[in-house]
Amino acid sequence: MIQLAILGSTGSIGTQTLDIVRLFPDKFKVRAFSAHSNVELLIEQALEFDPECVVIGKESHYGRLKEALSHTEINVLVGAEGMKVAATLDSVDTVVAAVVGFAGLESVIAGIKANKVIALANKETLVAAGSLVNDLLAEHNGTLLPVDSEHSAIFQCLVGEPEDSIEKLILTASGGPFRARPANTFSSITRQEALNHPNWSMGAKITIDSATLMNKGLELIEARWMFDIPSDRIDVLVHPQSIIHSMVLFNDGSTKAQLGVPDMKVPIQYALSYPDRWEAPHPRLDWSSIAHLDFEPPDLEKFPCLRLAYAALEQGGVSPAVLNAANEAAVDLFLRDIVRYVDIPIIVEDALGRFGGPLHPTLHDIVEAHQTVIGYVQELYRVRAN
Ligand SMILES: NC(=O)c1ccc[n+]([C@@H]2O[C@H](COP(=O)([O-])OP(=O)(O)OC[C@H]3O[C@@H](n4cnc5c(N)ncnc54)[C@H](OP(=O)(O)O)[C@@H]3O)[C@@H](O)[C@H]2O)c1
């Protein structure tokens, strides 16, 4: 039996992970859940799965959670410290890291230090602290398995292949909802339009990141650390149908790709079943209905966030953490109608040019850079927000 802690259990990845758990009740026991503010769903999950502990991020919901679970043995915890406890429980062997944003980082680090297997959806962890996480994985002989569909695709292509045979990774991108929209109309893009992804149903932040192509930039940095490969050997290719989830070009000229219906349950399940595959009723591709697969290079003029991600990786040090923090702050402002879609790359580029730090940052340096950038961007727009 796999003993799980699901951090971010109320989100898109968290709830789909629970669908996998329900599909294979004999294979899993969920020991811990965490949510930020969706206390009612967290209560439902706790009552259905009877974990050892639950964690609520927002302290103001603690009373409601505690009262709803008062007739159970479930331990009720709060905040970032609570998430670390959940990630390091003796009974847990695999942590599903499905929190959105930088808030997921410290619990992943705690899990690695406690020798847990990490099934990683929270790409911001590797974006902000990739080098540090890799050092910790090496030190603890740890295992980190991808949940992101592109990284799962690459991981699946690499099974059985010699490490030194990779020539290039090719990350595919849907191009988002504005791929074909003229750039001169971008200043009028609304939140509703940006939240309408053509192929995937996901949480709000990653949906906006997909609309700016920052999501592909974050995935580029995630791939750089996950597969330990320099960015000049990672290409991005726009593939609007999202059927090829990514590819690997090998040094003998052969290319492998992983294909499937766009459905996150498949990569979530693979991260949990690896190295096995479990028979499951997820939708199959119907080849007779696929007339063609299209490809085009990404337009870095129209979508500057992807260019900025390559630049941050090139700059190194805390720059990817700065990129990530500025993007988190900018997306939050966009979702609250305080800045426009076109302001997101402007905010990120400004922060990247303004904030630096040591070339080999510690966790303290990274947390400090994150908080400084978030504070800076929030202060810039404070007047407009009030
Ligand atoms: N969704 C996808 O298809 C997909 C695909 C690939 C990768 N990912 C990655 O997976 C991660 C999760 O994405 P998602 O789409 O599942 O996000 P989501 O639907 O927004 O869910 C995020 C989860 O994190 C919790 N959370 C939010 N802010 C938090 C905070 N400050 N502290 C602690 N917990 C917090 C949320 O709790 P509440 O519900 O209580 O707010 C929720 O459980 C992201 O890093 C994303 O890039 C997602």
Image: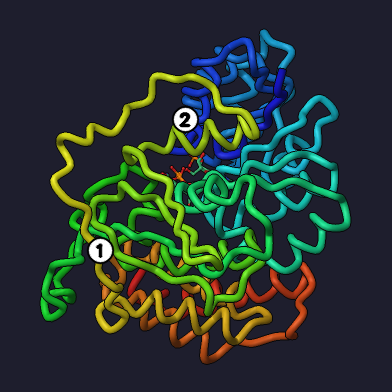
| Residue 329 in view, yes or no | no
Depth order, front residue of 168/269 = 168
Q: Position of residue 282 (x, y in %)?
A: 38, 25
Task: Specify whether 41 is left or right of 193.
Answer: right
Q: Is residue 113 left or right of residue 276?
A: right
* Of 139 and 80, the residue lying toward us: 139
The numbered mark, 2 or 1, whose residue comes first in the sequence reads 2
- Does 110 appear above or below 169? above
Image spot of residue 197 (x, y percent): 25, 51
> For residue 25, which numbered disc appears in the image?
none
Q: Which residue reaches farthest right? A: 139
Does dot 2 land on a helix, a strand or a loop? helix
* In the image, residue 266 above or below residue 162: above
Residue 31 position by quadrant: top right
Q: Is mark 2 within 8 Å of ligand 1?
A: yes
- What residue appears at the point 62 percent right and 63 percent down from the top-left corner? 165
Q: Residue at x 47, y 23 (%)?
A: 19
The amino acid beneath tag 1 is Phe
Mark 2 = which residue? 15
On the image, the x and y values in percent for residue 198 come to 22, 50
- Which amino acid type corresponds to the residue marked 2 in the rendered image? Thr
Question: Which picture quadrant has residue 82?
Answer: top right
Residue denoted by label 1: 295
C-alpha gap between disc 2 and disc 1: 32 Å
Q: Quadrant of the N terminus?
A: top right
Instruction: Locate residue 59 relative to residue 335 in the image: left or right.
Output: right
Mark 1 lies on a secondary structure that is: loop
